[in-house]
Image (tube, rainbow, N blue to C red):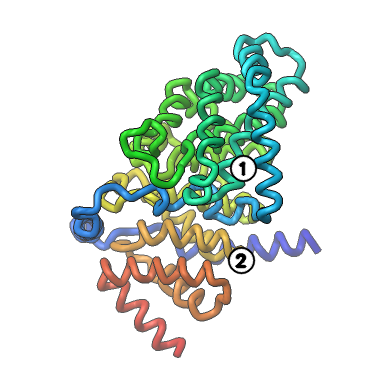
Amino acid sequence: AAGADVTARRAVHKKIKSFFTQFRGRADAELEHVRASMRLEEAAASAGLGELDAAQAVDVLGVDGFARLLTSERKLEFLTDLRETLRNADNLARALHALRRGNVRNLDEQYDVLAGFANMLSVVEVFATPQERRGVADDIVKVFQLCTQHQIATVFVRTLRELASPAIVYEALRGITYYAPGPRIASTPTDSQLHSRHMFFKKLLVNEGVVPPLLELLVADHDDVREQAVLAVAAIAGHNPEARDFLLAAGALQPLLALVDERAPFTTLRKVAWAIGLLVGVSHPLNRLPPWEAVEPALEALAVMLFCDDAHTVANVCDGLAILLPGVTELAVCRRLTDLLRQTEEPRVQRAVLKTIDAVARHDDYQLQTLIARADLLG
């Protein structure tokens, strides 16, 4: 039965791919006109408002359906354990110092230290929104200060390079995913180094050389390691156009596109669609979009995943298409969007599809007519 399912999915994907052999802008000048109109709209909307508060920003963690859904009791239990752990900060510092100096040779000990710090940093996932984090801000700041004071970025990056074991590398990647975006606490002063605009924690990781080994792990043999590497790339790319452009220049997009495969599990496709979306401009101001030539290869992969049966994947794909689709001639995608809007009962997919259609409608008269005609045809 499993073999028949894979064969059926492969046949569907072959049929889909025939639609997307090549994406073409109607003309370079017209495509640039559309993207320029998106940038101008962003500038007009932002005039006089300044930078969005962290509480209003789309969060890299949790927005894609992977964040843990914990009850208030479980969150309180986590917080109690975290505070007990922080009371033994001296022991944690000694363990991290030994690991940084290379004095921990036992793989089990390495795993315990890295997993311990990754678990502490996961406070930003347990308390999944900036507003929630504001209520436990003191604890979160203590975690990040402890990690930074004892140079955890050095330990994380060295672990990626040494490849001691898949389990150890996975914990280092998990730690990077939580650490890179910073605390993201609502109402953080913009002049504080903890504010996401300063990319303080991302810069620490990049200065340690995190990007090359991280990109190599996107093709790792172990699924868990590969998927966590995808989320780590997303964590670095989100919100900061400078970090996104650095990753694009380093070649982060191509290994992600290579993961779009009909045999890939939905857990992989969800994360890949999310990471690709961030690289093409999701969570960034529209007046800071990446160069078209840097992100154009993502169109085919996003379009193929638009036909996926997983709601989380489709929603993430739509977020990326809302950035890329205006100005590009691809009628099959417009047809698929109208079909999804008519057929799906998933609220998140409905919202994402409407967002994409809205972007097309406001910036691309040609495809707007296609959407209207398709809607009339479907009744």
Residue 21 percent location from the top left of the image: 44, 58
> Which mark, residue 309?
2
Q: Residue at x 45, y 56 (%)?
A: 300
Question: Which is nearer the eye, 100 or 124?
Answer: 124
Residue 321 percent location from the top left of the image: 41, 60
Q: Is residue 180 left or right of residue 73?
A: left
Q: Give the answer, above or below, for where 127 lies relative to 328.
A: above
Residue 209 percent location from the top left of the image: 47, 22
Q: Is residue 280 left or right of residue 142?
A: left
Question: Disc 2 marks which amino acid?
Answer: Asp
SS type, badge 2: loop
Does residue 135 show up? yes
SS type, badge 1: helix
Q: Residue at x 38, y 66 (%)?
A: 330
Q: Pointer 2: residues within 10 angstroms few (<14), some, or many (20+)?
A: few
Where, quadrant-wise, is the C terminus in this rendering?
bottom left
Q: Is residue 68 left or right of residue 239?
A: right
Q: Quadrant of residue 203?
A: top left
> Which mark, residue 227?
1
Question: Disc 1 marks which amino acid?
Answer: Glu
Task: Give the CA separation, mark 1 to mark 2.
Answer: 19 Å
Question: Which is nearer the eye, 207 or 145?
Answer: 145
Question: Of the residues under marks 1 and 2, which one precedes in the sequence?
Answer: 1
Q: Pointer 1: residues within 10 angstroms few (<14), some, or many (20+)?
A: many
Q: Is residue 259 left or right of residue 206?
A: right
Where, quadrant-wise, is the N terminus in this rendering?
bottom right
Residue 139 percent location from the top left of the image: 56, 36
Which mark's residue is nearer the viewer, 1 or 2? 1
The outermost residue toward the right is 1
